[in-house]
Image (cartoon, rainbow, N blue to C red):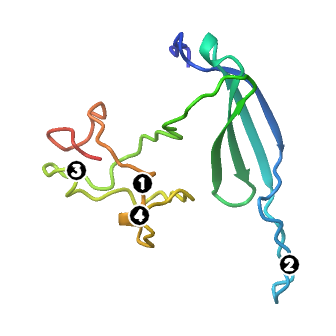
C-alpha cells in the first residue's frame, strides 16, 4: 500500500462507520423450524468525496454487509447529493476482481474458454426477462487481463 498514489480527480476517503446491520427483510419464521433467527453481522460503510469543484457536495458511500457464520458479503454503492447541482451517473463499476482462470488453455479464444464457476455473484439488476443466467446477466463480465502474465495462454487471452 506504500506505493499507492491518489489521483487528483479521485474521490477521497473521508470516514468509515461500523454498525450492526439491519436485515432488509424482517423475517419472522412461522413454520416448523423453531430455531431460526435473522442473520447477524456487521455493516461497514466507507464514505468518499471529491476535491473537484464540480462534485462538491456529492458523497459516495460504499456499504459492505459481512455475515456471521457464513461466507457471504453484500456490497452496494449509494450516492448522496448534498448540493443543488444535478449529476447524471451513466455507469458504476462496483468491483473489479482478479481471479485465477477456470481452465488453463494454451490456445483458444476467450469465448471458447470456461468462465468462472468458483465464485457466485447475485444481482438484482437483470435484463431480457430471462430466467437463464447466460442470456440475462448484464452485470458480471469476465474479461481478459493481458497483465496477468503467468497464465498459460500464449496470447494472454484467458478471461
**Percent position of residue 131, x then y:** 45, 73
Q: State the CA–CA distance, disc 1 to disc 2.
A: 38 Å
Q: Residue at x 47, y 57 (%)?
A: 119
Q: Secondary structure at mark 3?
A: loop
Q: Which circle's residue, 1 or 2, is located before the other in the chain?
A: 2
Residue 138, label in figure:
1
**Percent position of residue 81, x then y:** 71, 29
**Percent position of residue 62, x then y:** 66, 37
Mark 3 or 4, closer to the camera: 4
Q: State the CA–CA distance, disc 3 to disc 1.
A: 17 Å
Residue 35, label in figure:
2
- In this image, 10 relative to 38: left or right? left
Q: Residue at x 74, y 40 (%)?
A: 44
Q: State the CA–CA distance, disc 3 to disc 2.
A: 47 Å
Check if mark 2's residue and mark 4's residue have beta carbons within 8 Å: no
Q: Quadrant of residue 149?
A: top left
- Residue holding disc 4: 136
Mark 3 or 1, closer to the camera: 1
Q: Residue at x 70, y 27 (%)?
A: 59
- Residue holding disc 3: 110
Amino acid at each position: 500500500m506504500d506505493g499507492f498514489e491518489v489521483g487528483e480527480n479521485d474521490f477521497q476517503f473521508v470516514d468509515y462507520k461500523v454498525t450492526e446491520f439491519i436485515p432488509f427483510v424482517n423475517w419472522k419464521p412461522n413454520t416448523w423450524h423453531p430455531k431460526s433467527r435473522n442473520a447477524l453481522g456487521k455493516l461497514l460503510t466507507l464514505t468518499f468525496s471529491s476535491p473537484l469543484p464540480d462534485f462538491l457536495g456529492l458523497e459516495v458511500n460504499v456499504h459492505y454487509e459481512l455475515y456471521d457464520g457464513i461466507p457471504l458479503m453484500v456490497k452496494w454503492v449509494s450516492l448522496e447529493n448534498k448540493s443543488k447541482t444535478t449529476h447524471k451517473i451513466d455507469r458504476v463499476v462496483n468491483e473489479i476482481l482478479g481471479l485465477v482462470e477456470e481452465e488453463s488453455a494454451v490456445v483458444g479464444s476467450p469465448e471458447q474458454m470456461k468462465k468462472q464457476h468458483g465464485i457466485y455473484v447475485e444481482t438484482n439488476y437483470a435484463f431480457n426477462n430471462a430466467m437463464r443466467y447466460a442470456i440475462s446477466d448484464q452485470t458480471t463480465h469476465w474479461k481478459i487481463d493481458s497483465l496477468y502474465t503467468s497464465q498459460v495462454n500464449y496470447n494472454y487471452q484467458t478471461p
